[in-house]
Image (cartoon, rainbow, N blue to C red):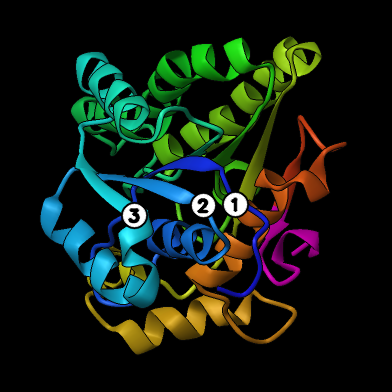
Amino acid sequence: MTNARFNNKVAIVTGAGCVGAGWGNGRAIAVRLAEEGAKVFAVDRERERLDETLELAGSVRDAITPWVCDVTSSQSVAAMAQACIDTYGTIDILVNNVGGSAAGGAVELAEETWDLQVDVNLKSVFLTCKHVLPTLLAKGSGAIVNISSTSGMRWTGSAQVAYAATKAGVIQMSRVMAVQHAAQGVRVNSVVPGQLHTPMVETRLARQRTGGDVSALLAQRQKRIPLGFMGDGRDTASAVLFLASDEARFITGTELVVDGGMTARCD
């Protein structure tokens, strides 16, 4: 354990599995929180993905409790929040990491795909906050960190209107909740990852964008990054841990962009 920023803290991390081997955002967040002392309620819709997270957690795997949940279902989310309380006694931190993109603009995107994107990327955040916030407000303390995307702030190389709209919605939802609950001791912020090299790039995005050519997609993405290299899920995790910690006690209602300088470019 590197240090103990989160001793005696309980964190829920949604999307704590991963679509492939390696460090996706949620997997990295869950493991890093555990490494720094938290008890982690790791949530995903597929138990197999959570088992892979536990394997990568190594010596801190006993600090992580896996839980299968459909975060687009209010009933499932309510049961998940109660299960966390039953397991650990409380909730201190909520990290909303569930999300996924679908290519297409308003003309070509199917209405059903739009609805699914809204449910997965935006409604999921609403539901987890709906069912976890009462615990944080009753305690008079807590931190929520919502994972958005640079697609919610700027054009990132392809038309994905539903993903962009929903990730922009995550940012604004976070701001509204931050102001509403600031006086009650609950902080709400967003982390905004950019062109990261996560397992999703190789297992899903390459098929959508470059016909399965992973190298071509990685080259396209890296070209947009002033720092000249792509981060990964561990970089997202570092930003989340800062915002969830007492080091960020005076930070709420804002966004921490993790994109190697891409958003600062005007081209």
Mark 1: few, some, or many residues within 10 Å (few <14, many ≥20)? some
Q: Are marks 1 and 2 in contact (CB under 8 Å)?
A: yes
**Residue 148 shown in magenta:** no
- Residue 86 in percent (x, y) is at 30, 26
Q: Secondary structure at mark 2?
A: loop
Cα distance in 3D space between marks 1 and 3 = 14 Å
Q: Are marks 3 and 2 in contact (CB under 8 Å)?
A: no
Q: Earlier in the sequence, mark 1 or mark 3?
A: 1
Nearer to us of marks 1 and 3 is 1
Residue positioned 74% across, 12% down in the render:
184
Q: Which label was assigned to residue 226?
A: none
Q: Secondary structure at mark 3?
A: strand
Q: Earlier in the sequence, mark 3 or mark 2?
A: 2
Displayed quadrant of residue 82: top left
**Residue 167 located left or right of residue 253:** left
Residue positioned 21% across, 68% down in the render:
52
Q: Is residue 156 above or below residue 57?
A: above
Mark 2: few, some, or many residues within 10 Å (few <14, many ≥20)? many
Write the start and end of the magenta stretch as one range: 257-267
Amino acid type, callout 3: Ile
Cα distance in 3D space between marks 1 and 2 = 6 Å
